[in-house]
Image (cartoon, rainbow, N blue to C red):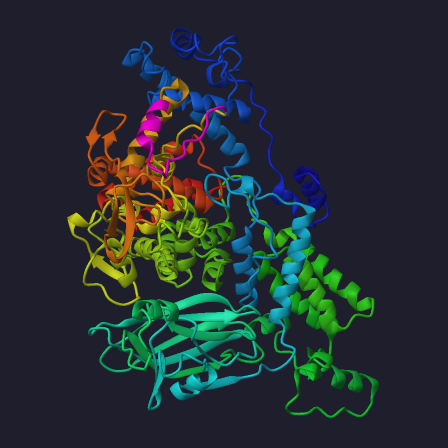
Amino acid sequence: MKRAAFLTILILATPGLLPDLAAAETKEPAASLDPKVRAFFEQHCIDCHDGDIKKAGLDLTALKPDFTARDNFAHWEKVFDRVSRGEMPPKKNEQPPAAARAAFVKSLGGELHAASLARQTTEGRVALRRINRTQHENTLNDLLGVSIKLGDVLPDDGSVAGFDNVSEGLDVSSAHLLRYQEAADLALNAAIATRPPKKLASRRTGKEAANYGQMPGLMDKFVRLDGGRLNVYIVLPFHIESDEVPTTGRYRLKIVAQALNTGGHPLPLRVYGASGHHRDQRTLATFDAPPDSPGVFELETLLHKQGVIRIDGWQLPTEHTVRDRLKGKPLDGSYTGPGFAFELMELEGPLSEFPPPGHKRLFGDLPLKPASVVKAERAGQPLPEIRENRNDDEWRRDPLIPVSKDPRADGQRLLREFLPRAMRRPVDDKTIAYYVGVFQERLDQGREFHTALRGTYRAILSSPHFFYFREQPGSLDDFAVASRLSYFLWSTLPDDELTSLAAKGELRKPAVLRAQVERMLGDKRSQRFIENFTGQWLELRKINATTPDPSLYGEFDAFLLWSMPLETQMYFGDMLRHDRSVAEFVHSDWTMLNSRLAKHYGIDGVHGGELRRVALKPESHRGGVLTHASILKVTANGTTTSPILRGKWVLEKILGTPPAPPPPDVGAIEPDIRGATTIRQQLEKHKAIAACATCHKHIDPPGFALESFDVIGGWREFYRVPDGGISKGRLPLPHYPERTVLRGPDVEIGGTTPQGREFKNVDDYKALLLEDKEQLARNLARQLLVFATGAEVQFADRELAKSIAARTRDRNYGLRSLVHEVVQSPAFLTK
């Protein structure tokens, strides 16, 4: 079913929703073309873009002077951008006088700005928008006090302008509604208490871990008992594992361990959850076991039923690696490489009260009784005997259910309390009456009280009232602002404080908004903003999209992969917390490192698996996200790097000047990993095509600035080639002396910017970027506006992004200041 048709049915079938979803039609007359614009076209553009030639598929003679039609507006916007950036007319053509170009830009820009502003005034910036998959999961979890994963249930979201919360990418179909019902069922099942939770109080000592995980050929060689401790010298195939947890919930973990033979340095231990038949792994944390005495590590974490906790030494060798190193020498139990002494693991939980908060939100304080007891009481029969320690089958056959003496009154009361919270605003009497009617109709059909109420909750949690943002054109009311703010910084529904301020009509006050942003950024839920925003703006979500070729990049391992995105997330978090300048996204004299990343970057003196702030020396060539291993990995494939991909990434993500898409008939440039031709040689041929040269003069410079970094972010001075390639011999790998690689051609670096500025390496290029900090701030302001409001940056927003950046100038374009200015902006506070 088409989106428009489905929405029409959905709107008409949902009471109280139609006024909020109606959008005004724009019926303005077509704009007339300014004589200055027409004269500029005729003198400098028509020769190449008329009905006969149509270079790049553009016929300016057929382009109507109508700025109200969206498709037509987009063509005019593209023309404006190419001319204002000096990309058109092409450099080989006669260039217009500066005054003529300025007059053209001013005139056309004014027309476009006025048309864009008029559309925003009548329709609003943000089209009808639903919560996306991540927000949907968080909202259900936070509303019902549960922790369930819904990634396999909720449909994927489209990405527009680099983000998955933009209205144009959030379509709705009948399939969505079915999935939303399934998600609501799963969340309700997790929230509703049907039995007291089984408690776990597990304690495993070194001796018990040895007995549990004993494997022939390992004990007394790589895993040895030492009194009450278990000394472990390998990472595979031996592992230390807890007891299975009986119930999904939050558990408290305690580990006691000590590093062995590490030269006085801590040893990173990986702490991970494993669940499912194949023990799917989820890294929870690293624990730096100290070298001098046993250390204690404590953690509270979510575990799913039948899941376990495992620990191992992440940087320890495997059994096969050790055997290879010993080269056939007998294993007599004398191996004493780095390892750790495991003493104790305690695991207890679940930690929540009973009934849990989510159940109380649904059924209040209504008493719980076994279904068999309720049935017997209703029939006036003798009460059945309920064993104190019932097994799983008994609880499934005879669950606890909430009991009401006055089902209709209790149901209405509970729905009145639940609806405003689920819909994130006050609910009118008509809507309340509708859902109360749904509930009472189920009672009239003979449904049990709890079944009828649960079915009504399911209807609410899969309705447009729940999954749509309810915003009217013009200024947002306080409840809409509360939702927009909460989904911006927490990716979930507003909490009680935001809702209370909205109810008082105080949230829109600038001082109150600022105080709330400060409070919300100080809350642990702001980590969702850090992960979601960096995951999309910087494309960290693609970190697992490619697997480095092990024959070329054998130093790549799981520890490095885990550390990569954490460096960037923690870097962004530190900048946000301390209001650091956005210029530090380009360059800084610090970053966030652990021992694994430090080894990869060739930086000494960093030990342990926990990431922390580390000062950088100029010769490290690091500093700023451009040189983070995470960014360098997501902008490469598993075998080669491409200046085109990396250059395009820098233009889009850092500078905010994305290149035009390539012509459809132009082939891709593939680096020659055999070393016969260089990427620069291939690109020079490619740029001989006039349609390509215009964009590549912008794309190639940042791409070649980053060529000194390989596909996993390691510094390099030469390309690696596979066995059989054209090489200059085999050399030890810098920072990994135990590995050797075939040396290919020297890395091609340096270049010239479109402005004619030469640079020799990445350090020079970063210095050039830092000359225009305000452009960096304007770009980030635009990125934040898109993510915060759920709408692409429109032409009228360009001046707004400039003003937001300008207002942070006296604070050195601080990241936290930018967030505050975005929240205070008209774009954020209006539809």
Q: Quadrant of residue 780?
A: top left
Image location (x, y in percent) of residue 776? 30, 39
Q: Which residues are drawn in magenta?
A: 665-685
Q: Is 767 positioned to the left or the right of 367 in the image?
A: left
**Residue at x 43% of width, y 87% of height:** 208
Residue 144 picture quarter? bottom right
Give the quarter of the figure containing the N terminus.
top right
Residue 666: within the magenta? yes
Tell me if 423 is positioned left or right of 580 in this view: right
Residue 377 on the magenta segment: no
Residue name at image x 60 percent, y 43 percent:
171
The structure residue drawn at horizontal position 30% and vertical position 67%, both measured from the top left corner, is 325
Q: Which of 693/376 is in front?
A: 693
Query: 302 left or right of 324?
Result: right
Q: Is residue 497 left or right of residue 723?
A: right
What type of secondary structure mainly makes up the magenta span?
loop
Image height check: is 411 above or below 175?
below
Report the front residue among 309 and 359: 309
Percent coordinates x, y for residue 318 in the rendering: 37, 69
Residue found at the very far left of the displayed protein: 618
The residue that appears at 36% across and 45% down in the rendered structure is: 722
Q: Is residue 505 above or below residue 40?
A: below
Between 339 and 460, the residue placed more toward the observer is 339
Of residue 757 and residue 38, the one placed in the foreground of this image is 757
* Residue 775 x, y percent position in the rendering: 29, 35
Q: Quadrant of residue 335?
A: bottom left
Q: Position of residue 135 (x, y in %)?
A: 52, 55
